[in-house]
Amino acid sequence: MANQEPTASAPHPASSPQPSPLRPRRKSPGGAADRNQPPRKPEADPADPHAAAVTRLAAVLAAPGLRAADLAALVPLAERLAAEQARRVFLGALSRLQAELPDIPERGEIRDPDGRPLAAYALWEDCAALLRAPLARHGFALCFRTETGAGALVVAARLAHVGGHVEETSLSLPFDASGWKNPLQAIGSAAAYGKRYAAQALLNLVSRGDDDDARAAGGAPPLAAAALSALRARLQAAGASEDKLARYLGLSSLAALPAARLPEAEAAVAALAARRGA
């Protein structure tokens, strides 16, 4: 019987698995399979100090043998990171809010002693009514605090976001005694002015009236003669110089004062009178 050479039998599939041609095995740089390796974390943007600080903090917290003293030393860094994140969330929400803010109509009027309208301005109640819904929709709250001093009212405003960041501003205004107001009305009027100006500063509000087109064309309505005479009388009673007030307002003379700037001039005279005790 002729000798037959032994033939190699095919290996059993279970004993020698072969890689699928449709699903090649991934190799690590060293050539070994890395399917059991944790996914690589994205590197922080070196141009973003906030992201870089977050990466450093995460690396320290992941280090073995972290002591309580080390953890306590990281608290200020974690607080700064949280504050920066809250600020970024605030700015993003503020940019979306400002895109939805309406122009405030100027329904308030300043009149001369004869009852003729001199200028228009936005009322605080209109501002509050138009701001309420957009502020709430974007997670903002606007609140105020007032303090009274010697003839002046300090209005402090806070714009807070649900993310934790707060922006503040404050201003001091003389009591608005114009138009034969009693002392309580003078304080209330100054508070309304202060809230409106503070809200404008925090939110960049815009108000518009019927005479805006005339202003844009360079035709700002002049101050009526009766109102100018009343302003000069108040200025004289305060012992102030008309020329100095004009220079303070950036005018060549007080006679060039536009009607729209009468409240600014009256506020300046009232502040001067309060300082001099007039």
Image: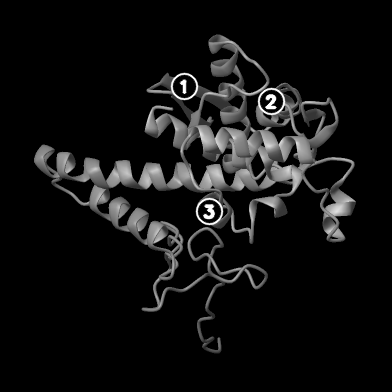
- Please say if the residues under marks 1 and 3 sit with CB atoms less than 8 Å apart: no
Q: SS for tag 3?
A: helix
User: Where residue 155 appears, x then y in whole percent?
Assistant: 48, 27
Q: Residues within 10 Å of mark 1 (few under 14, many from 20)?
A: few
- Where the C terminus falls, by quadrant? top left
Closer to viewer: mark 3 or mark 2: 3
Q: Residue 230 versus residue 147: which sits nearer the camera?
A: 230
Q: Residue 244 versus residue 159: which sits nearer the camera?
A: 244
Q: Residues within 10 Å of mark 2 (few under 14, many from 20)?
A: many
Which residue is label 1 attached to? 145
Residue at 38%, 23% (x, y): give it.
Answer: 150
Q: SS for tag 1?
A: strand
Which residue is label 3 attached to? 248
Q: SS for tag 2?
A: helix
Q: Residue 67 versus residue 49: which sits nearer the camera?
A: 49
Closer to viewer: mark 1 or mark 3: 3
Q: Amino acid at mark 2?
A: Trp
Relative to 196, say whether 53 is above or below. below
Circle number at residue 124? 2
Residue at 83%, 48% (x, y): give it.
Answer: 221
Relative to 132, say whether 272 is above or below. below
Q: Which color scheme does this rendered protein use?
A: one colour
Give the mark nearest the N terminus, 1 or 3. 1
Q: CA distance from mark 1 to mark 3?
A: 29 Å
Which residue occupies the extreme bottom position in the image?
2
